[in-house]
Image (cartoon, rainbow, N blue to C red):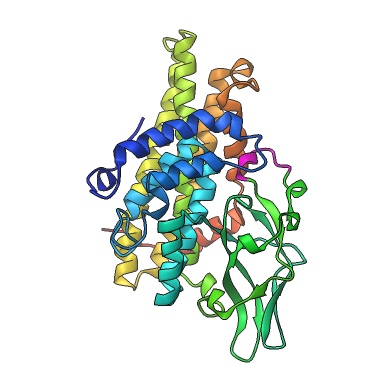
Amino acid sequence: MKFENDTLAEHKTFDWLRFRQVLIEIEAMAAETENDPNGPVKEFQLLHHCGALKLVLPDHALDFNRTNTPALLQLLNDIGKANLSVGRIFEGHINTLYLIHLYATPKQRHKWFNGVIENGDIFGIWNTQNQNGIQYAETNSQLEIAGSKTFCSGAMLVNKALITGNIKTVERDGWQMAIIDMDRISKDQIDKESWKPLGMKASGSYTVDFSGYQLDDSELLGEPGVYLKQPYFNGGAIRFAAVQLGGAEAIAEYTTNYLKELNRTDDPFQQLRLSCIMSAVMSGRLWLQQAGKYFDSWVNEGNHDEDLIAFANMTRVNMEEICLTVMDNSNRCVGARGLMETGNLGRIFRDLTFYLRQPAPDATRLNVAKFFINNPSAFHE
């Protein structure tokens, strides 16, 4: 069940039909890719060749400089439906390009954007860390990195990684972004044994040790602290929510087809469950459509930061509930036989269950409540 992306379909520089075929190919490879330690290499080659990696760059179909967020969310939804791990890595690529769009110098934008266009560079954003987190130390007028990042999605694929860490020099003090050339990180600095998840195995979210990396000033992105700048930090949650809904849509489709194959769609109890599934999916689409519209209008107006954050938070937590509703009802529809290892549903359940575990879900809900306590008439048209 799909809603067409008119923004892409009508753009002369993007082959929409080829992209649709790429999604079919990505979905067909998902079971094999799940156990590949190198991750979805072929999938991202396909996304590069069909032009998806550069879609958000200037003068391209979903140019960040235009009001394209609803169409971008639908694209993320489509990719998530094909393969959640691919969607997770792709969303990180888009997230990084957006931060470059916001904070890079013109020279940096030219360099990094051209890398995507000419070389198919894949960007990733890695912020999570343990006690041995990232420090930028100045030694003999040279910045050198010490420390590691965890949950580095696409670690074997990404060749330009945005990382964050503490910097303290004469010119800079605080939480600093940097774009790292992964070709200068040796393979033995990528710890594959650190990634033993229930789901999202294909995302290859390994631990990467950046110690010893000599950092050039031109690799520093923005001023210290801007990574956490609102409304962009919390507002970006709508993008991973779009990928998550894609996984729920895949479950809905597989569940319906499974019941058709068993001639069980006339069972009223199964119909009740399918009704719950599809109602949840449609609710998710409405959340995404409205979130995209609000994001574009409120960012452009510049005086709705709290509203944007609150709606993004609501979108995120409601999407979690929507996905859980879809999974619960699907489980009851297909039973144990529908969740065998060889089936697609088991993989999607594993991936979506893991992907829904985002940071601070309860605090996010509390922040929504506090917003409405202080703004009881918010979102009234």
Location of the C terminus by quadrant is bottom left
The residue closer to the viewer here, 235 or 210, is: 210
Who's the residue at 61% across and 42% down the image?
39
Taking the spot 46% from the left edge, 36% from the top edge, the residue there is 81
**Residue 380 x %, y %:** 29, 59
Residue 166 position in % (x across, y down): 66, 76
Q: Residue furthest front?
A: 118
Q: Quadrant of the N terminus?
A: top left
- Is residue 28 visible in this depiction of the protein? yes
Picture layout, residue 119 above or below residue 264: below
Toward the viewer: 212 or 264? Answer: 212
Task: Examine the residues drawn in magenta and state their main secondary structure.
Answer: loop
Is residue 3 at least partly visible in the picture? no
* Residue 199 located within the stretch drawn in magenta: yes
Number of marks drawn: 0
Which residue is at 28% across, 46% downward? 8
Residue 60: which quarter of the image? bottom left
Looking at the rendering, the stretch of residues picked out in magenta corresponds to 196-203
Residue 240 relative to residue 141: left or right:
left
Asked whether 208 or 350 is in front, the reply is 208
